[in-house]
Image (spheres, rainbow, N blue to C red):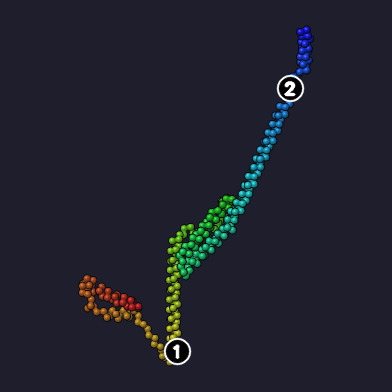
Amino acid sequence: MTHAPNAITETTDQLAIGHDEYDPEPESAADDQGPELTTTVEMISDALAQAEAEVDRLRDKKAAIREAEGAASRQVRLGIVRQAANSWAIDCNRARSRAQEHLENLAIATRFDVAKLAAAFGEFKLADARCGANALYARNLDRTDPLPDSPIGAPRERSLRTGQQYADLTWSRYLDQVINDRARAERDRCFNLLQSFAHEQTENAAATARAAALALDDYESLDVPQPPAIAELHQSAVAAINEHDFDPEQMKAAGVISVRRAAQNAELEKLIDAGN
């Protein structure tokens, strides 16, 4: 225990020495933390500026993409609608004309095939409908690429090169028309045949009579027998009517004149039925 004071003294000295060596330096820590905070704010500001610049870049890029898309779309749309209004319209007209020609050939064919005619009519209607669809789409050209206004300021429109012309034409109406046309054509054909036959026969008869007349002596004439006219035959038939054969009851009811006319008309009908 005799060394305790010395130990205490040493311990105290060590604490004193330790106190001198330990320096928490609170002010130095505060000084170091200030620049670190400043650096962090600057970094955030720089990052934010970079982010905003990136947003602006992406926004401009998006706008440029949309502008390019719009320009490309307008270019293609204008090209397509111009084709529709011009070359495609002409193609539609030609296709419809071919379908119509085929239909008309079947309609006047010697052998009348209703099934083939119906199929051809359907194709013709479809070709006409395609012309109508083309016209509807080609009308967009006036909106996509409008014409300049007239000198008085009125809007202008292009003339369509095609269009649906037979929208209201039905199969039943067309078939009736074809049948009637065929009937008229057959009537005309037969009439022309009869005329040709009569002309040929009369020419032959005239040639025969001419040859016979040439063979006669001078001042002689060829006697060519003529068939009696129906008026002469009817006059003879009327003269042969015996009114004593009339029915007395009919004469009382209708009168003599009416019965006589009826008898005369009956004789005329007999002559007509006989081929006169």
- The residues bearing labels 1 and 2 have C-alpha atoms spaced at a distance of 158 Å
Q: Residue at x 27, y 75 (%)?
A: 263
On screen, residue 270 versus residue 157, left or right, reads: left
Q: Residue furthest bottom?
A: 217
Q: Is residue 140 above or below residue 110?
A: above
Q: Residue furthest top?
A: 2
Amino acid bearing label 1? Leu
Residue 152 shows in this picture = no
Q: Is residue 246 above or below residue 87?
A: below
Q: Residue at x 78, y 14 (%)?
A: 14
> Which image quarter holds the N terminus?
top right
On screen, residue 232 versus residue 19, left or right, reads: left
Disc number for residue 214: 1
Q: Position of residue 45 (x, y in %)?
A: 69, 32
Q: Earlier in the sequence, mark 1 or mark 2?
A: 2
Q: Residue furthest front?
A: 1
Could you tell me which secondary element the residue under label 2 belongs to? helix
Q: Which is more foreground, mark 1 or mark 2?
A: 2
* Residue matched to label 2: 29
On screen, residue 57 versus residue 137, left or right, reads: right
Q: Residue at x 48, y 62 (%)?
A: 119
Q: Residues within 10 Å of mark 2 (few under 14, many from 20)?
A: few
